[in-house]
Amino acid sequence: MTISADTIPVLGSIGELGKSYSAWLVDIWGVMHNGVRAFPAAVEATRRFREQDGIVVLLSNSPRPSEGLQRQLRSLGVTDQSFDATVSSGDLTRHELAKHQGARIFHLGPERDLPIFDRLDVTRVDAKDAELIVCTGLFDDETETPEDYEGLLHELADRKLTMLCANPDHLVERGHKLVYCAGALAQLYAEDGGEVIYAGKPYAPIYELAAEIIAERAGRKLSRSEILAIGDGIHTDMAGATGFGLDAVFVASGLHVGPGGEGLDDVRLAELFEGRKPPRAAMPALAW
């Protein structure tokens, strides 16, 4: 398919298009905030949609369980009035870990992600004693890159340990800086022959859980044509929406274009969506 302005219109407002859906699944990092502060226009857009009886579920590849994720959202300025519920990769990882009671876990990731293990019957151990890996990210994503982990990942892969990847994202924006996530380490691990179980977008289980929560809020099961996915990740948000049969709106964060949507045009959209199902629309930023 040839991508053009008619194929993927670039919108300044989601109001008219967004109102034709009953629920939104909205990515968080890159759409609602940049890891440092909330985007006021996005917070206002989701609040306005809810005022018109729309349901907003924030869908994140964050390894934080929803309780901690919502605290973080409030601290960055994403208000409770702008969403009905959150679903995170951390929630799904905890669900998977509950199947491994008593397991010895090697946690590959920063200490801030330790709440993912709260009240679970698992024991955190050093890598040499582990029978399962939970990867939530790099130990220090401000200074390290995935290449720093090649030796460790190779040793773990040789032992045939399964890795639970609690954040399939490879990169996210933190302020105006790109930092690596657990997905980048999981990719190296898989390339080394290691088995990886991904908890999050673009994989179906996180969408199934979100659809269940939407049904609870709506009092009925919504058809997939009634749900709009909004996100900035081509390989996560857009691919996940396509795989689950949802319409999507692409928000052009610094992952794929310049700051503030700079460079969002037909040429760039054609490059990004070549060979892929195009979204309903693209936006430089989520706004009503």
Image (cartoon, grey):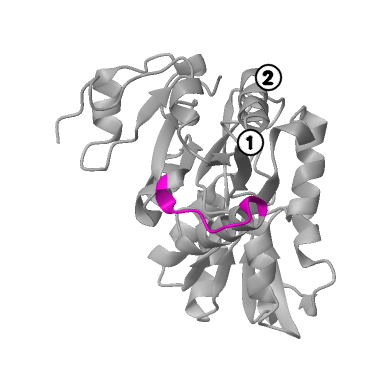
Residue 252 drawn at (x, y percent) = 45, 26
Above or below 86: residue 130: below
The tag on residue 40 is 2
Tell me the quarter of the picture where residue 136 sits. bottom right
- Give, as a three-letter code, the residue at label 1: Asp
Residue 287 drawn at (x, y percent) = 55, 20
Q: Nearer the viewer, residue 71 or 211?
A: 211
Find the magenta span and give its range. Answer: 217-225
Circle 2 crowding by C-alpha within 10 Å: few under 14, some 14–19, many from 20:
some
Residue 172 drawn at (x, y percent) = 56, 37
Q: Quadrant of the C terminus?
A: top right
- Give, as a three-letter code, the residue at label 2: Pro
Q: Residue at x 70, y 32 (%)?
A: 82
Which residue is situated farthest in the right direction here?
A: 119
Above or below 162: residue 43: above
Tell me the quarter of the picture where residue 166 sits. bottom right
Does residue 151 belong to the magenta stretch?
no
**Left or right: 216, with 20 as reference point:** right
**Left or right: 49, with 226 as reference point:** right
Residue 2 drawn at (x, y percent) = 14, 30
The tag on residue 180 is none
Above or below 285: residue 83: below
The tag on residue 53 is 1
Tell me the element at label 2.
helix
Q: Nearer the viewer, residue 27 or 119?
A: 27
Does residue 220 belong to the magenta stretch?
yes
Q: How many marks?
A: 2
Tell me the element at label 1.
loop
Which residue is situated farthest in the bottom direction here?
A: 102
Circle 1 crowding by C-alpha within 10 Å: few under 14, some 14–19, many from 20:
few
Above or below 8: residue 248: below
